[in-house]
Amino acid sequence: MNKYSRLIVYTLGGTLFISSFIGMIVYGYKTFYIEEEVGSSDNYRYHFALVAEEIDNEYWRLIEKGARKIAAEHDIYLEYVGPLKADNDQLLKLLDRMVSVKVDGIITQGVEGQRFVDLVLKGVERGIPIVTVDTDVKSSVRKVYVGTDNFYAGQLAGETVIANTTGEQYVGIVTGRFDAINQQERLEGFKDAIQETERIQIVGIRESNITQVGAAQATYSLLKEYPAINVLVGLSALDGIGMVEGLREIAPNKDVYLTAFDILPETLNLIQREKIDATIAQYPEKMGQVAIEAMINLQQSDLLESEIFTQTIVVEKENSDAFLQGERR
């Protein structure tokens, strides 16, 4: 190979290496987390971090919206971070990072396991108060939990099924993530509500990975394996929408009672169109607001309460108009 040929080979090889290296960095950044900057934290009263389960999830965006509203009113710099896709390992890495940069306070979803407990302890030992939102880990030294009483929310879903059905009911459950504590608590609450009602039994449970597509696939799988299912219950925000899609694919004419979770606009529209019978309303914007208010108070002293439960109610067609019109927050 002459000098000119070697030069071409080396140049191409170098270009390929640099391109691959840059691609790896970009891919890793987009895969693991996105950080949204709103300016420098130097000119603010406090610097708080909100670590979301999944950064572009509609539900978490509502929590962020509520948090930003209160943060703006109190001259607080709020850093919003999270994995691109729900991933406990990446969430914990981001939590560790926020502890390491010594923000003034961290609001995050609780994650089951000793690693989360240790990271919370690490933060608190460094003088960083930590508030759990949406999902609690009571075994940690977090200062306060803000959000739904998830066991009670599951009970509401069960009571709704009992009140609105007759005869034998075979229930298929779509849960966001098997390893999510809030999903586990909702499922336990549902089981508690129906345990003495012999005509209602759970026949199958599938995971949606908190995505609409995943919920549709889970619904298809449930009905294919258990065609007797006549009740579907979704335990996370996008499950109801996905269950409607999955039911349309495999059994469009089947009469199935559908109970969803959360009051995303599409969920409410499907209730209005009688595609979903009921949903359990949480108030994610309110969670974000209360979490910031609690964190402000924690900058001065500990809070007396260890749990602040936000409202949870059943929404059906009869009372869905108020939510669609934005009359309830």
Image (spheres, helix red, strand yellow):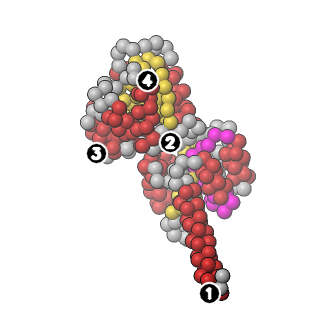
> What amino acid does circle 3 point to?
Gln
Q: Secondary structure at mark 2?
A: loop
What residue sits right under mark 2 in the picture? Answer: 209
The amino acid type found where label 4 is placed reads Tyr
Whether residue 85 is situated above or below residue 15 in the rendered picture: above
Question: Relative to residue 173, is residue 177 depicted above or below?
Answer: below
Asked whether residue 109 is drawn in magenta, I would say yes
Calculate the distance from the C-alpha at mark 4 to the C-alpha at mark 2.
Answer: 21 Å
Q: Which region of the structure is painted magenta?
A: 98-113
Nearer the observer, 297 or 171: 171
Residue for badge 4: 226
Q: Secondary structure at mark 3?
A: loop
Circle 4/circle 2 CB separation < 8 Å? no
User: What is the CA distance from the residue labelled 1 to the residue labelled 4?
Assistant: 68 Å
Task: Name the image quarter holding the N terminus.
Answer: bottom right
Report the residue marked by disc 3: 325
The residues tagged by marks 3 and 1 sit, at their Cα atoms, a distance apart of: 71 Å
Classed neighbour count for the residue bearing mark 4: other residues with Cα under 10 Å, few (<14), some (14–19), many (≥20):
some
Residue 150, how many percent across, how many down?
52, 34
Give the alpha-carbon distance from disc 2 to disc 1, as whole Å: 54 Å
Instruction: Specify the amino acid type for callout 2.
Output: Asn
Q: Residues within 10 Å of mark 1 (few under 14, many from 20)?
A: few
Disc 3/disc 2 C-alpha distance (Å):
30 Å
| Between discs 3 and 2, the one toward the N terminus | 2
**Label 1: which residue?**
4
Q: Is residue 316 left or right of residue 74?
A: left
Mark 3 or 1, closer to the camera: 1
| Image point (46%, 50%), residue name | 57
User: Could you say which is closer to the camera, residue 74 or residue 39?
Assistant: 39
- What's the residue at 55%, 45% (across, down)? 133
